[in-house]
Image (spheres, rainbow, N blue to C red):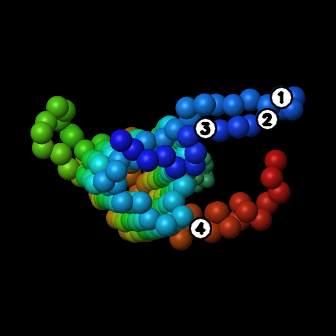
Amino acid sequence: MGTSHNGSSQMGKSTTGQKYSNPGVVNYVAETARIGKNVKIWHFAYVGSDSEIGDNVMIGSLAHIDYKVKIGDNTRIEGSVYIPPLTIIGKNVFIGPAATFTNDPYPMSPKMTGVIVEDGAIIGSRAVLKAGVRVGKDSVVAMAAVVTKDVPPGVVVMGHPARPKYSRKEYDLKKAQWEKTDPR
Ligand SMILES: CC(C)(COP(=O)(O)OP(=O)(O)OC[C@H]1O[C@@H](n2cnc3c(N)ncnc32)[C@H](O)[C@@H]1OP(=O)(O)O)[C@@H](O)C(=O)NCCC(=O)NCCS
């Protein structure tokens, strides 16, 4: 039995104004999962047993968060992210759409080891992280990177295998510059 967040049935309106309903739109949250305050879990997401989700976390549609996962406060997990058992994710982390974490380097093995993501890190869309790696505080993993080794704190890594390219400080400068320019 699971509990549902954000409603088990949705009503909406099409662009032509026609009303429609989506009966049975649900997510699944295990009864033994511990969910913090102000958590948003969108449709068709899954949260497994004994997982701990901090306050103000957002979990996007189709995200799969398996058992014994820990997610810190204010972390944002976009749609279609896969997070297997034993993964530990810190506070204020961003995980882009369809990022994939792994926990079994030689499947199928009964021995599993989770990825650790430290506070403030950013994981780009479709990045893949090898079982047991640690992504350091405030680091950035580029979209589509394949992370095979620990990422030190405060760096931006890219590529296959992911290698440091520049610092988080430089990333923040680029971001600030980008935010000043007019949108396309
Ligand atoms: C990592 C990232 C921040 C780099 O941005 P950037 O510094 O503006 O990148 P640039 O386009 O200036 O490219 C800088 C260099 O990095 C390379 N590069 C950029 N992104 C890369 C990536 N994902 N993988 C491999 N190389 C990449 C470029 O080819 C370029 O290489 P060069 O110096 O040899 O020419 C950005 O590519 C990224 O991955 N952002 C995350 C996006 C995301 O997942 N958002 C999720 C919400 S939708």
Residue at the image point whose x is 79% and y is 35% from the top: 13
Going from the N terminus, do you reach mark 4 or mark 1 first?
1
Q: How far is mark 1 from mark 2, CA to CA?
A: 5 Å
* Disc on the earlier residue, 4 or 3: 3
The residue lying at 57 percent from left, 49 percent from top is 6
Residue kind at label 4, given as amino acid type:
Asp
Query: What residue do we see at 13% from left, 36% from top?
Result: 109
State the CA–CA distance, disc 4 to disc 2.
Answer: 39 Å
Q: Nearer the viewer, mark 3 or mark 2?
A: 3
Whole-number angstrom distance, CA of label 1 to CA of label 3: 17 Å
Identify the residue position indicated by label 1 in the image.
18
Question: Badges 4 and 3: C-beta atoms under 8 Å apart?
Answer: no
Q: Are marks 1 and 2 in contact (CB under 8 Å)?
A: yes
Residue 118: image quadrant is: bottom left
Quarter where residue 51 is shown: bottom left
Measure how far apart labels 3 and 2 are at the Cα level.
Answer: 14 Å
Q: Which residue is mark 4?
A: 172
Number of other residues with Cα within 10 Å of mark 4, as a class: few under 14, some 14 to 19, many 20 or more: few
Residue 118 is left or right of residue 24, and the answer is: left
Q: Secondary structure at mark 1?
A: loop
Q: Is mark 4 within 8 Å of ligand 1?
A: no
Which of these two is toward me, 48 or 89? 48
Which circle, 4 or 2, is nearer the viewer?
Answer: 2
Give, as a three-letter code, the residue at label 1: Gln
Most extreme residue toward the right is 16
